[in-house]
Amino acid sequence: MTSLEQSNTPTLHSPKTGKVRTISGKQTISVLLEQMVQHPVYGKYVRRRTKLAVHDAANAAKVGDTVEIVPCRRLSKTKSWRLVRIISSSAAAQS
């Protein structure tokens, strides 16, 4: 692969990992993404959270599961992500 081909690889569609917070309907789950960002002035690390609506076609995810999601076409007003796989199940869902 040449350097030109490597630079054209899309980085916008990288998968993200988060935890399922709620089940919001038949095929929708709410996933919370957390990241630590350094404050530009003070240098302290601050926790940033993003809550996303994710399409779960199989209704496989449960509350507390760690899931991998990728962006997709807009499915509704707020839903433009889809579930790829469940990385780990929560202890509460297993018992």
Image (tube, rainbow, N blue to C red):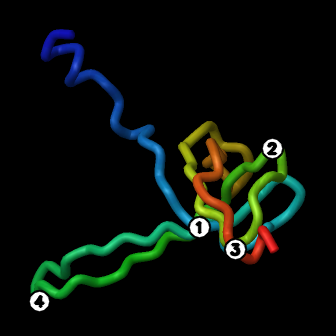
- Gap between marks 3 and 4 measured at Cα: 38 Å
77 up-or-down from 40: above or below: above
Tell me residue 57's x, y (percent): 80, 44
Q: Which residue is mark 2?
A: 57
Q: Residues within 10 Å of mark 4 (few under 14, many from 20)?
A: few
Question: What amino acid type should be assigned to the residue bearing mark 2?
Answer: Ala
Q: Which residue is mark 3?
A: 91
- Gap between marks 2 and 1 measured at Cα: 17 Å
Question: What amino acid type should be assigned to the residue bearing mark 3?
Answer: Ala
Q: Which residue is mark 1?
A: 19
Which residue is at 62% across, 37% downward?
73
Tell me residue 80's x, y (percent): 62, 48
40 up-or-down from 69: above or below: below
Question: What amino acid type should be assigned to the residue bearing mark 4?
Answer: Tyr
Left/right placement of residue 19 relative to residue 48 reads right
Q: Nearer the viewer, mark 2 or mark 1?
A: 1
Q: Earlier in the sequence, mark 2 or mark 4?
A: 4
Q: Which residue is mark 4?
A: 42
